[in-house]
Image: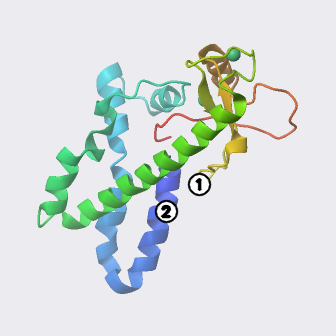
Amino acid sequence: MRVRDHIALSTTAAALLFPWLRGRVLWPWAASIVIDADHYLWFCVQHRRLNPVAAVRYFNQAQPTQHQGTRLFHSPAVLLPVVLSRSGRAAGLGMAFHVGLDAYHAARTRCARAAALQRDGFACQACGTQGAHVVTHLWRQPWLLSSYRVEHVISLCPSCHEAAHARKSGRPLSNSGMGSYGHDSDGPF
Ligand SMILES: [Zn+2]
Ligand SMILES: [Zn+2]
């Protein structure tokens, strides 16, 4: 799930809880957003550069390498000790909220992608190649909060997928007048 979606959802949750928790919402709220810094730290270590623009570009590729290291703060090995510690519990609950949203997002996305592949008969909708290597591409997404509509997912072979991302306009077919903006990595941006 993207950072902007997390910010929107965490801020809404914090606003709803504020009448009861007051200032105590601050730590869980901040932790639920800052947790995504692991992706950025991983990128900086891997590529030895401190460049937010390069990081955003990297995670917006068609198939960015998803190494376990990109999700270090999301892993139970980091999460559990934080939640169980007395001083870190509030922040840990915020992080757990974040990881829960990510899991929900991943499950809904998987369903939409599987349905799109079925609909397209595992054939690239740009060049017609068929096979198990065909992947799915989100060719249209709202600016805020993901859509899980199957109509917004299209099947593409890896090279047409790369091309769709290089063009930035995700839709490979020119039969739609709708503006499109493909981005379907599981990266945070
Ligand atoms: Zn193709
Ligand atoms: Zn894509």
Mark 1 vs mark 2, CA separation in Å: 9 Å
Disc 1 C-beta below 8 A from ligand 2: no
Q: Is residue 5 above or below residue 72?
A: below
* SS state under label 1: loop
At a point 18% along the width and 45% down the height, the residue shown is 77
Residue 46 place in picture, x, y as percent = 31, 22
Residue that numbered label 2 is attached to: 9
Q: How is the image coloured?
A: rainbow
Give residue 174's quadrant in the image: top right
- Location of ligand 1 given as a quarter of the image: top right
Residue 145 marker:
1
Say few, some or many: other residues with alpha carbon within 10 Å of mark 1 (under 14 / 14 to 19 / 20 or more): some
Q: Is residue 33 above or below residue 187?
A: below
Taking the view exactly as shown, the residue that stands out farthest to the left is 86
Q: Is residue 170 visible?
A: no
- Count every numbered label the image shows and give the total: 2
Which three-letter amino acid code belongs to the residue tagged 1?
Leu
Question: With 184 as the anchor, is 66 left or right in this view?
Answer: left
Q: Reading the chain from its start, which is encountered first: label 1 or label 2? A: 2
At a point 22% along the width and 48% down the height, the residue shown is 76
Q: Is residue 71 visible?
A: yes
Residue 101 place in picture, x, y as percent = 43, 56
Say few, some or many: other residues with alpha carbon within 10 Å of mark 2 (under 14 / 14 to 19 / 20 or more): some
Give residue 145's quadrant in the image: bottom right
Taking the view exactly as shown, the residue that stands out farthest to the bottom is 19
Residue 53 place in picture, x, y as percent = 50, 31
Q: Is residue 34 above or below residue 27?
A: above
At a point 60% along the width and 35% down the height, the residue shown is 183
Which three-letter amino acid code belongs to the residue tagged 2?
Leu
Residue 105 place in picture, x, y as percent = 49, 50
Give residue 129's quadrant in the image: top right
Asked if the residues shown at circle 1 and circle 2 are in contact, with their CB atoms under 8 angstroms apart, the answer is yes
